[in-house]
Image (cartoon, coloured by chain):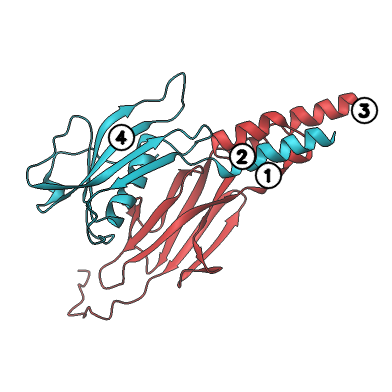
Chain colours: A cyan, B red
Amino acid sequence: MKHIINTLVLLTIIALTSCTPKISSNFTNPQPKLSINDEVAFLDIEHEIPENTVKIGDLRFQDSGFSTDCSFNSLLTQARNKARANGANIVKVVDKKEPGIWSTCYRLKIELYKYDGNVSSLPQYELKLG
Amino acid sequence: MKYILLSAILLFSSCATIISGSRQEVKITSEPSEAKVYINEIEVGNTPVEKNLKRNQEYSLILKLDGYETYTTKLERKFNAWYIGNIAFGGLIGILIDPITGAIHKLKPEKVNGNLKNGTTYTTKGEKLFIKISLNIDENSEKIGQLKKI
């Protein structure tokens, strides 16, 4: 009985602490932080990066094994927060693995860029509320 | 005794998912009303506004109204006490299912150092979350006129 209780407590701790995806980041050229009023564009695989951009860094979203908050829109929202914190206003998806047999999560490779032009004029992915 | 135990396990499997569901209704009102509401920077309407949000994620909440300061906060995920039903009754299925559906969480406005953001109040009725926000007048703006209904 004690063993069962210990297992249940362990499972609960795992369930409560491991629901976010694993994020790896590498910022090679961080810039001053952007405010909430600065727009950030989402460029999906098919959208091209405009000219005159500066690369700020890379992000990688992986399945931690217990991730539940890992829809495409949710990952992009998290990427936007990282982008603003490092001065980037373009979130470019360079590799996208959709949920399947091995994972219920989207897994993304993202590049972050700083663009001096108006990002709202770029062809981009429109974020949806899950 | 075994039957009672088995019934309890089946009954309380996925406790939070059954009781709360994977989404939570959130109603946002403001004083004054008609403020534009943005959830995760997506415009969702003017106050009062109601949305059915997934429980498994956090949201940014922004309210904008001309002549008033922009209001920002977060909706955070907190622990949903219904999940304890799984542990209390050993519902192994529920222990696994509730985190997957997100029912292990409930949404609440962000607290900093234990306090809600100034001008924010909230209540919950059943599973529904009601948030009321008092907007502050923007001191940099100046009223220059008023439209009249004809």
Question: Residue A58 at x, y = what percent?
Answer: 28, 42
Q: Residue at x 50, y 42 (%)?
A: B56
Q: Residues within 10 Å of mark 1 (few under 14, many from 20)?
A: many
Identify the chain of the residue marked 2, using the numbered disc in the image: A
Q: Quadrant of the C terminus of chain A?
A: top left
Q: Residues within 10 Å of mark 2 (few under 14, many from 20)?
A: some
User: Residue tagged by mark 3?
Assistant: B1
**Viewer-nearest residue: A19 or B32:** A19
Q: Quadrant of the N terminus of chain A?
A: top right
Q: CA distance from mark 2 to mark 1?
A: 17 Å
**Which numbered tag is attached to residue A109?**
4
- Give the residue type that dot 1 points to: Trp
Q: On the same chain: label 3 and label 2?
A: no
Q: Quadrant of residue A98?
A: top left
Q: Residue at x 27, y 62 (%)?
A: A35
User: Residue tagged by mark 2?
Assistant: A14
User: Residue tagged by mark 1?
Assistant: B82
**Can residue A128 be seen in this snapshot?**
no
Q: On the same chain: label 1 and label 4?
A: no
Asked if the residues shown at circle 4 and circle 3 are in contact, with their CB atoms under 8 angstroms apart, the answer is no
- Give the residue type that dot 2 points to: Ile
Q: Earlier in the sequence, mark 4 or mark 2?
A: 2
Q: CA distance from mark 1 to mark 3?
A: 24 Å
Q: Residue at x 83, y 36 (%)?
A: A2
- Give the residue type that dot 4 points to: Lys
